[in-house]
Image: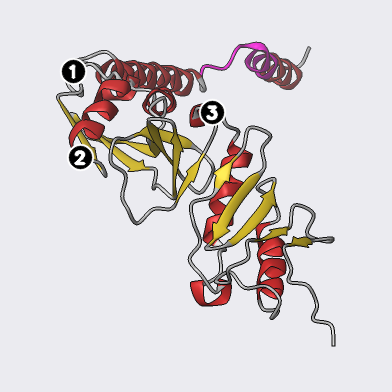
Amino acid sequence: MSRWKRSKRDAWAKDSAKAKAPSTHGRPMLRRLAWLGGLVGVLVAGLVFLFFYSAAFVVRDLSVTGVEGELADSVEAHAQIPHGRPLARVSQANVEARVLEDPRIASVEVIRDWPSGITLDAHPRKAALVLRQKDATWLADTNGVVFDEVSEPSRKLPSVRVPEPPTEMSEETVRGLVELWRLRPDPAELEGRLGTPRLASDGAVSMKVDQLTIVWGAPVEAERKWAVVKALVGQDSIDPQGGIPQTIDVSIPETPVVTGLPEASQN
């Protein structure tokens, strides 16, 4: 075999061996990636421990805003956030649910004040109606929620006499009573002063404007019923200030019934 052919064969063998041999060029990169991955894992584990389990960021201060006095104390007590609990482990949803167990609170926001505080921003319900039942007096809001029993409600609030404990009434009924009063006409339009509405055991409402009795029926369709009442009161034959007791029944507003009308004069 000639020297040239042998040299060519040896070169081909070297190239083939290099092609078959495993490359070590990528090993340093893999080692660096593995090292970075381990470092990231350590950092994540450290952060989890720092925020969720260490004493670095724990509840030391708890404040309540939006309400005062006994109601603020109730918010704090219902929240059940112990001092020393890591802030990251305080469940906002659970705290809110517990605070809202007090029906006087309409909403609450749980705010983490890093590094060691929590603020409970509470919003109380606003009374729109007083419900009186025997010796008990309750407050209700515009949503129909009966939320507090009181001894001396504001005289600026309208009141309704009810036959059963207000806490057992449906929110729909209470909302209807709120709407009844909210949409009431001015005294000039009614030609008299509107008295305290009464809710009977059958769910029907009645009230008086001086000598005129209004049979309202179920506390629904307030706007339509008041429109019918105003139209009827505007007639000369109906006079809340007259000496003859009269009744307007708008329990079915499409077909109102009037009783006590004076007899037509005969010429």
Left or right side of 255 for 190: left
Give the mark, 1 or 3, whose residue is nearer the N terminus: 1
Magenta region: 14-24
In which quadrant of the rendered view does residue 199 lie?
top right
Q: Amino acid at mark 2?
A: Glu
**Front residue of this view, candidates 212 and 123:** 212
Left or right side of 248 for 93: left
Residue 20, percent across and down? 67, 12
Estimate how packed mark 3 is, as few (under 14), some (14 to 19) or many (20 or more) residues with alpha carbons within 10 Å.
some
Whether residue 193 is in magenta: the answer is no
Is residue 151 at all visible to an observer of this figure? yes
Q: Check if mark 3's residue and mark 2's residue have beta carbons within 8 Å.
A: no
Using the numbered discs, state the Cα–Cα distance from disc 3 to disc 2 in whole angstroms: 31 Å
Q: Quadrant of the C terminus?
A: bottom right
- Which secondary structure lies at badge 2? loop
Q: Check if mark 1's residue and mark 3's residue have beta carbons within 8 Å.
A: no
Specify the principal SS of the magenta part: helix
Q: Which residue is mark 1?
A: 83
Is residue 118 at all visible to an observer of this figure? no
Q: Amino acid at mark 3?
A: Glu
Vertical relation: 154 (above or below) 152: below
Using the numbered discs, state the Cα–Cα distance from disc 1 to disc 2 in whole angstroms: 21 Å
**Front residue of this view, candidates 29 and 34:** 34
Estimate how packed mark 1 is, as few (under 14), some (14 to 19) or many (20 or more) residues with alpha carbons within 10 Å.
some
Whether residue 16 is in magenta: the answer is yes
In which quadrant of the rendered view does residue 190 lie?
bottom right
Give the mark, 1 or 2, whose residue is nearer the N terminus: 2
Left or right side of 69 for 99: right
Using the numbered discs, state the Cα–Cα distance from disc 1 to disc 3 in whole angstroms: 43 Å
Q: Which residue is mark 3?
A: 164
**Front residue of this view, candidates 70 and 5:** 70
Q: Which mark is residue 68?
A: 2
